[in-house]
Amino acid sequence: MKPSLTRRRLILGFGTLAAATLLGGCGFKLRGPQPLAFSSIYLGVSRQSDLGAALHRRIVANGNTTVTDDPAKADVRLEILRDQAEREILTLTGGGKVREYQLQRVMSFRLVGRNGNEWVAPTTISARREYNFDDAQVLAKEQEEALLFRDMQNDLVDQLMRRLAAAKP
């Protein structure tokens, strides 16, 4: 029994080494911060909000762009045109009780330069999640819903950062 266990470990070790070699050879690289084409930005959302704090954190972590509080001093202004969270019933049981909900968060924005020209035309991004609902676990399901909304916000911030990185004057 021991020789087969040793043989399995040896095969697993070689397999792991081969996978690492293939990934290294194909040019695979983790995505890091993407530089933005502007040196300062005004966020059209409060830093005290969850969205504003997340955006501020991501832009500052990028390293080459500062967030200003005065729109006149910024190279560009991010204008959040719409930020809406929705919850819809997805399915019902035979007895008419909710079985599943669909959560959706929709955000529309545009990026405007100092001279008024649009760097990014009005754009809408969205994220959706679904979850099963159980009347017997209402508190747990409320926490799950809050976690899903937070996850969707992170997803929207990621999408927004990719759009900002692609923006050119």
Image (cartoon, rainbow, N blue to C red):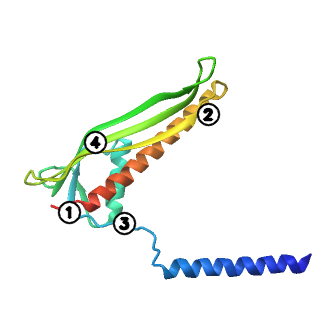
> Tags 3 and 2 in contact by the CB under 8 Å rule?
no
Q: CA distance from mark 1 to mark 2?
A: 43 Å
Q: Callout 3: few (<14), some (14-19), or many (20+) C-alpha neighbours within 10 Å?
A: some
> Tags 3 and 1 in contact by the CB under 8 Å rule?
no
Residue closer to the observer: 164 or 40: 164
Q: Earlier in the sequence, mark 1 or mark 4?
A: 1
What's the residue type where badge 2 is placed?
A: Ala
Q: Residue at x 28, y 42 (%)?
A: 108
Q: Earlier in the sequence, mark 3 or mark 1?
A: 3
Instruction: Judge depth for marks 3 and 4 and give the one in front.
Output: 4
Q: Callout 2: few (<14), some (14-19), or many (20+) C-alpha neighbours within 10 Å?
A: few
> Tags 4 and 2 in contact by the CB under 8 Å rule?
no
Is the N terminus in the top left, top right, bottom left or bottom right quadrant? Answer: bottom right
**Residue 38 shows which numbered tag?**
1
**Residue 108 shows which numbered tag?**
4
Q: Which structural element holds mark 4?
A: strand
Q: Earlier in the sequence, mark 3 or mark 2?
A: 3
**Residue 140 shows which numbered tag?**
2
Q: Earlier in the sequence, mark 4 or mark 2?
A: 4
**Does residue 26 sit above or below 136 in this rendering?**
below
Residue lying furthest left in this view? 115
Q: Residue at x 39, y 39 (%)?
A: 105
What's the residue type where badge 3 is placed?
A: Pro
What's the residue type where badge 1 is placed?
A: Phe
In the rendered image, which residue does mark 3 sit on?
33
Q: CA distance from mark 4 to mark 2?
A: 31 Å
Q: Earlier in the sequence, mark 3 or mark 4?
A: 3
Q: Position of residue 21 (x, y in %)?
A: 57, 82
**Does residue 100 sit above or below 8 in this rendering?**
above
Residue lying furthest front in this view? 94
Q: Residue at x 20, y 59 (%)?
A: 40
Q: CA distance from mark 3 to mark 1?
A: 14 Å
